[in-house]
Structures are given as C-alpha cells and as structure tokens.
Amino acid sequence: MLPGKPPPDFRVLIHGVNFALNKRCMALRSARIARMLTEEEEGEERQRQGGVAHELADAPADPAAFEVVARFCHGYLPELSPENVVPVICVASFLEMTEEHSPENLLQRALSFFSSHVLPHWNETLRCLRGGAAVLPHAGRLGLTDDILHSVADKVLAEPLLLRNPVEACDDQKVKRRLFVVDWFAEDLTDLGLDLFVMAIAAVADAGAPPTEVARCLLRYARKRARVGASPGEEYEWNSHRRVVETVEKLLPREKEALQIKPLFQMLQSAIFLRAREECRRGLEERIGSLLAEAAVEDLFIPCHGYARETRHDVGCVERVVAQFCNAAAAGGGSPELGRVAELFEGYLAEAAAADGGLTKEMFAGLLRMLAWLLGAAGRGGDGVYRAVDAYFCAHGELTESEREEICRAALDCRRLSPAVCEQAAQNERMPLRVVAQVLYVGQMHIREAICGALKDSEGEPSESGQTTTKSGEDEEEEDDEEREEREENEECEMGTCGHCGGVAEGERRQRKKKKKVGFWREMKWKLGCKDAAYACNCSLRKVHPVG
C-alpha cells in the first residue's frame, strides 16, 4: 500500500503484485484508468468493500516502474533514473498519461528526462538500454529503442575506443582524463545481455564503425560470456553459452584484416567444448585459416572435449584449419605466407608426434602429406618431414617394420633431405632398412655432386658470366692420344701400308684398338657415376664405357 492521503479505494494487480490505490487520484492522471472506472459503475459496491482487484496483465512494465507511476498520481515527484525511465515511459503511455488528459503529466516529463539526461551521455545510454530490456517490444513501438541505438552508434563513431574494454582503451594521454574528468566512460558494451548486445553492435556496424573495433568487441564478448568450464549438467548455462558463441560467429566480419588470431582460437575452443553447430565451427576454422601465418605453435594445441576423444588434442580441427589455408593458397596461385605456415606446421607436427600418444598412424600420415605439400610449395627441403617421422617413431616404439615403412612412404622423400640429415638418418636405428638404403644412395649422390663440383673448380670450367678457362688434364691427355694415333696412321699411309696390302683388315684393327683406348680421367668419371649430362663436368668428348 502506498502511504499518504487520500485513502485507497480500489486495487490494481500488476504482474502478481497488488497495489491499493485511490481511484480519483489515478483517474485524474490516467485516461485509461478513468475510462475503466467509468465502465465499471456496476461494481461500485464491491470496490467499496475491497473486493476483486483490477488486473492489468498487459501493462508493459514491472511492479517497480508502476510504483513510480502510482506515486506520481498520488502527488509525489517522479523518481526518474536512466535505469527506469524507459519502463516508466512505457507505463505512462499504456495508461494514456498525456498532456491532453492532464497538464504536466508524467509521459511528457519522462520523455524530457530521456532526451536531456540520458541520450547525450554514454554511461546513461547503456544503463537505459539495459534497464529497458523487460519492455523492449513496447519501447520499440514507441521509438525509444531506435533513439537509444542511434545514440550508441553516434558516440562510437565519434570515439571508436568506446568498443574496447575501458581499462584497455586508456593510453598514457587518457590517464589524466580517467583520473580527473568526472564523466569518463566506464560502461562496457559487453555488459549487455545477448539480445541487447546484438542490437547495439549491429547498429554500430551499420553506422560505419571500424570493422577492426567491431570484431574486437565481438570476440571480447564471446570470451567474457562463453567461458569454457561450464558443466554439461547445467543445461541453462550450457545452452546460454553456446547461443552466445553461435550468435557472435554470425556477426564476425570475414575480412582477415579485421580479425585477431588468438581470440579466434579461444572462441573455437569454446565452440568445440560447448558442442556448437557444425556451421559455427566451420566458420571459425575458415577465419583462422586465413590468419594462420600469425599463429604460434601453442595455439594449434586445442584440447579435445566433445568431438574427438582418441587423442589429447583435436588433430582433426588443426588439419581442417591448415587445409583451409592450403586450399586458399592453391586457388590463389601461391601465398607469400607459405614459408611461415610451413615452419609453423612443422613445429606443431614434431611436438604433436612426440607428445600425443593417441595419434594413430593414419592420422599422422595425413598430417605428413600436408606438411610435405607445404614445404614443397614454400620451396623448402624435406628435413621437417624427417624430424616429424623420427619424433613419431620415438614416441611409438611398438610400430613394426612394415608400419614404419608405410608411414615413410606417405610423405618422406629422401631426395629432398639435406646432407646433414641424410648422415643422421643413415645412423638412425628407428628408420626402416629400406629408408636407410635410400638415404645411403642419396648420400652417395651428394658425394658425387661434391666431387663433380670440385672437379669443375679445378678444371676451370666456363663460368656463368661466359669467361673461358683452360682445359683440364684429362682432356689434354685424350687429345694427345688421338693426335698420336692420327700421326701414326698418316705415316703408315705415306709408307703405303694403308694401300692394297691388307688395308681393310688393318683399318678395322686400328678402329677396335681406338674404341678400347680410354683416358684415365674418363674412366674415373664413369666409375664415379658421371654418366649423363647432369654429371658430365662439361666434358667435350663423348663418353665411352670400357669394354671387358
């Protein structure tokens, strides 16, 4: 019961709360109540006896706002604040407390307070929006919601830092403002409920706020409102957090320049833990894939919660994220970030192979193939693949020889290994024998290349600049042999031995002798395997294999 004169003579029920009021005071300010009382002259006796209360079930306000209205009708000054002004306006509008019905009525007073004391200020505007959440549909019909959202958007356009955490947003120059200016902003947009936050951030984005600040605010809201750790048994909290993640993901921009990699990884972990919908997780993975070059190795270790339980970390999620990057790079004809992503994934795979005992050989082989593609596209060798394979073999000593060969066949190309890694692999007891043999062969090829390179340097081969050098000793020796044979043939011809007496047989004999004669250096090159143009050391003579 409200105190004061005159005495109450009828009752009103507002959302389960009973108010004892004076009908004359209420009728003087409210056209709706005056009309209602006039229509109920038949029940005058019942109301005198304190009978049935009038229920205003469709009144757009809570009991606290209706109490402010009732006190005003009974002669008290309205106690308006940013938190209650919107519900009071809605009740005053519902009760038709207009200037036409009574001068200086509550509706006009509340609207003036709303325009002059709420909308010009950031803190009061957010408090007003939060306080009007219960009467949002009616406030929307009155245009109050649009006024609040436009005010929020205008203030953000004037000062984009309003979208950040108030503590984070203040730099050295704004410390003075924080300490000495009375109206320094302290209200945070992320303190709003989900529906109000979505309305506010959508209005801010539509008004043209910087996408970077909008995305930063969205990710901060998700981190604040959807924390990992709620028990699945707490159904309401679980569903509420999942709804936050799914809603924020839809609002996030797609431009990579507007996003940050670490908050995205945190949000993806929340989506996995809360078992968000498939399209939500896929959207986050696509955004992370576009920013993968900015990630660190520890970001890729996403704990398993609900979707994958075979391993300690969600390897499938990482594989999809890297696949997103690879597909984008392949479609774009390459990417300048390939080297950075290859290095990142190489480090991740080496650590994952050693740390995650539940990583199956099929999953590891798929990751190996992806790493091999990245290293090849980035123009790097295959040492990273070998290190990952060795770490996996070290952590899975139960693998058989055939299983190890199968893993090596998946992506380990010995021809792309450096000489140092080849030497190490040849002495590695964990490597299959077939791989060791291949490594030894590749090592021999490296030695041949080194010898041929040394020969080129010693022989003074023509350089790339086109400068000519002297001939090698082997070439001079071969030329001397041929010149000596030609002189002997000429002398014999002069003496007549090349004439009619056994000339044909003697010529064939000399040809066979000539084919058998090979210089020392030519034979050494053949033994070293310099049989094709790649190992020819720029020899000017045709190579002849020794017979016998």
Image (cartoon, rainbow, N blue to C red):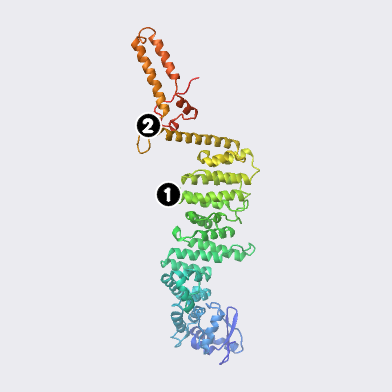
Q: Nearer the viewer, residue 77 or 495?
A: 495
Residue at x-position 37% and y-position 20%: 483
Q: CA distance from mark 2 to mark 1?
A: 49 Å
Q: Residue extending furthest bottom? A: 5
**Residue 145, percent from left and from top:** 46, 73
Q: Position of residue 479 (x, y in %)?
A: 39, 24
Q: Is residue 106 left or right of residue 425?
A: left
Residue at the extreme right: 398
User: Which residue type does callout 1 highlight?
Assistant: Gly
Residue ID for mark 1:
332
The amino acid at mark 2 is: Thr
Q: Nearer the viewer, residue 500 or 131?
A: 500
Between 411 and 484, the one lying in front of the other is: 484
* Residue at x-position 39% and y-position 34%: 461
Q: Secondary structure at mark 1?
A: loop
Would you name the residue on which mark 2 appears?
A: 470
